[in-house]
Image (cartoon, rainbow, N blue to C red):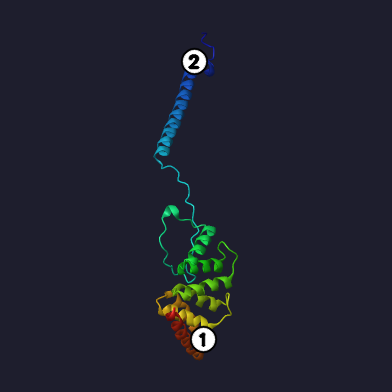
Amino acid sequence: MPPNTAVNPTTNPARKLDSTTVTVVVLLFFLLVAGVLFFVGLLNRDSEPPAVPPSIAKTTLNHNRADQSVTIPATPPEKQDDHPVNLLASYRAKTKEGYAYAMVNLGLMYDDGEGVIQDYEEAVKWYRKAVELGHTGAMSNLGAMYTNGSGVIEDDVEAYAWSNVAAAKGDKMGAKTRDKIKKFMTPEQIAEGQKRSREIMKLISKN
């Protein structure tokens, strides 16, 4: 090469080799990182528990308008069906056998419009039938119906009386309803409610 000839850096083989080496190293580095991340992702996926489908919430019936559970014979899980239509048929069948809990629950279904067209008068009818069998939850429910004027003419004295009798038999919600009504009653109405309570107790004791 003549001494005065300029050297073009871009044509320098050593420089080209260095650039190519750097590029290859960078590519290999990124491939290595990608491979590691992929492998870690596989491990995490394998360690996670399999997805569980969300449980289907069953419609549960509040077996007492006053939010107090009514004792119901246990039903084997494999035979239990809480669909309103099936509950309705089951309760109707049980009412014919004289089960008070079925009468209360049937009344509640009409009360809340569960599986049937809402009908307060029909609800009151079934509550009364259960009351004849001494069901305290039904007494409490009747007190609530008289308090709200649902299916019956609103009557604080009757509401107090039925709630008072339910409370006397240990129904906590009946006691709460009675105490709430009492705040808006005159002394004369309370006295009348006490009198009516005694009459109801006599009627119940005869059944």
Q: Position of residue 70 (x, y in %)?
A: 43, 68
Q: Residues within 10 Å of mark 2 (few under 14, many from 20)?
A: few
Image height check: is 25 above or below 1?
below
Image height check: is 77 above or below 13?
below
Instruction: Residue lying at the far front in this picture: please name it.
Output: 97
In the depicted view, which residue is nearer to us: 118 or 101?
101
Q: Residue at x 49, y 82 (%)?
A: 160
Q: CA distance from mark 1 to mark 2?
A: 108 Å
Q: Residues within 10 Å of mark 1 (few under 14, many from 20)?
A: some
Q: Position of residue 118 (x, y in %)?
A: 59, 67
Q: Residue at x 54, y 78 (%)?
A: 146
Residue 167 in view here: yes
In the depicted view, which residue is nearer to us: 17 or 76?
76
Q: Position of residue 162 (x, y in %)?
A: 48, 80
Image height check: is 10 above or below 40?
above
The secondary structure type at the circle numbered 1 is loop
Report the quarter where the C terminus lies. bottom left
The secondary structure type at the circle numbered 2 is helix
Task: Name the residue tied to disc 2.
Answer: 13
Q: Residue at x 49, y 15 (%)?
A: 13
Indicate which disc residue 134 carries. Answer: none
Instruction: Residue lying at the far top in this picture: please name it.
Output: 1
Residue 175 in view here: no
Instruction: Say what amino acid the circle numbered 2 marks.
Output: Pro
Q: How many marks?
A: 2
Q: Position of residue 125 (x, y in %)?
A: 54, 73
Task: Name the residue tied to disc 1.
Answer: 185
Q: Earlier in the sequence, mark 1 or mark 2?
A: 2
Of badges 1 and 2, nearer the viewer stands 1
Instruction: Say what amino acid the circle numbered 1 marks.
Output: Met
Q: Residue at x 45, y 76 (%)?
A: 174
